[in-house]
Image: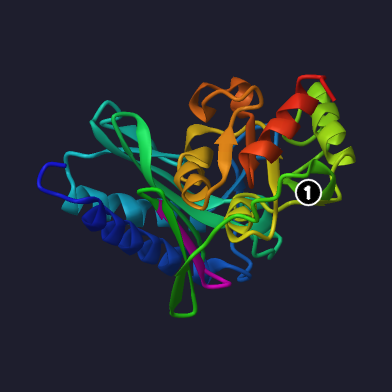
């Protein structure tokens, strides 16, 4: 690890999350200006997104100048580097501009193209998840503990979440129907939690998360958090999230529950 250990990188990732908090928290519920970066479509961005990513990038450039960076707002630098950071400064900007505290800062570190460390940080509720080396730690209000998924295996008892279940949202018509099929076999369905849902999955409060249209910066940090808590996260066919069509992600509290959801998606249940 070029003289560094995973502990060193983990401590640095927490510094990055703290730097992002200073930019996002002061702008949350403060009538921050909203800009549209998608032309006729609506893809909001705020100064919180941009300034948080700038703050993170400055620290990486100062401490690890040889590392690559892939960020939502400012693209890629040294993307072919062996070590690279993947950043989403505000995952859930729509929630952010509505004053809903389900947005999060996502920070991942990849080595050789695979995620080795992931952080989900929600500044307003002072909650932070870090997954690394097969363990996920949850921190809130100065206390830390390891967390585990619920381990639920029965789909009929599952609590399932997606950010937007409509075909007009992040799903195509076919994807919306696929989600509805899995949700119909679950006990409870909830919506609009963005990356925060994966933190709740790691805590055992949610059992399934099913989404589409995710990008590299959306999912890289989620993988170590979910897997470190004992969960499973793949594409909708069981493939690597990195190889998933249209950024389709299925995260589950157990291998058995994951398999049951995959069976529904395959039309076998």
Above or below, 213 relative to 43: above
Q: Would residue 220 appear left or right of 7 to someone viewing this image?
A: right
Q: What residue sits 82% from the left and 50% below the top? A: 157
Q: Position of residue 263 (x, y in %)?
A: 75, 25
Q: Would residue 251 appear left or right of 61 to someone viewing this image?
A: right
Residue indicated by mark 1 = 158
Q: Position of residue 85 (x, y in %)?
A: 33, 42
Q: What residue sits 36% from the left and 64% below the top? A: 19
Q: Position of residue 99 (x, y in %)?
A: 68, 65
Above or below, 245 relative to 154: above
Q: What residue sits 53% from the left and 29% below the top? A: 241
Above or below, 105 relative to 254: below
Is 127 within the magenta?
yes
Q: Quadrant of the N terminus?
A: top left
Is 177 within the magenta?
no
Q: Quadrant of the C terminus?
A: top right
Magenta span of residues: 123-131
Other-residue count near label 1 (Cα within 10 Å), few / some / many at <14 / 14–19 / ≥20: many
Q: Name the residue nearer the viewer: 206 or 99.
A: 206
Q: Position of residue 18 (x, y in %)?
A: 38, 66
């Amino acid at each position: 690890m070029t003289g560094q250990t995973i502990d060193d990188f983990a401590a640095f990732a927490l510094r990055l999350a703290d730097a992002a908090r200073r930019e996002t928290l002061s702008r949350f519920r403060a009538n921050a200006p909203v800009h549209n970066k998608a032309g006729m479509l609506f893809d909001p961005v705020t100064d919180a997104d941009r300034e948080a990513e700038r703050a993170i990038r400055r620290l990486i450039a100062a401490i690890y100048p040889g590392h690559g960076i892939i960020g939502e707002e400012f693209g890629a630098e040294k993307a072919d580097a062996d070590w690279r950071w993947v950043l989403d400064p505000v995952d859930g900007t729509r929630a952010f501009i509505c004053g809903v505290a389900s947005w999060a800062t996502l920070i991942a570190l990849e080595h050789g193209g695979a995620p080795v460390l992931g952080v989900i940080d929600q500044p307003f509720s002072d909650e932070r998840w870090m997954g690394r080396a097969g363990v996920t730690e949850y921190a809130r209000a100065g206390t830390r503990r390891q967390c585990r998924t619920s381990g639920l295996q029965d789909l009929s008892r599952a609590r399932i979440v997606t950010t937007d279940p409509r075909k007009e949202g992040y799903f195509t018509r076919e994807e919306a129907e696929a989600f509805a099929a899995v949700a119909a076999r679950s006990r409870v369905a909830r919506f609009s939690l963005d990356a925060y849902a994966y933190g709740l999955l790691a805590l055992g409060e949610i059992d399934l998360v099913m989404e589409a249209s995710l990008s590299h910066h959306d999912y890289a940090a989620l993988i170590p958090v979910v897997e470190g808590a004992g969960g499973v996260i793949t594409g909708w066919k069981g493939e690597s999230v990195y190889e998933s069509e249209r950024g389709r992600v299925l995260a589950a509290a157990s291998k058995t529950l994951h398999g049951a959801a995959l069976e529904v998606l395959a039309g076998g249940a």
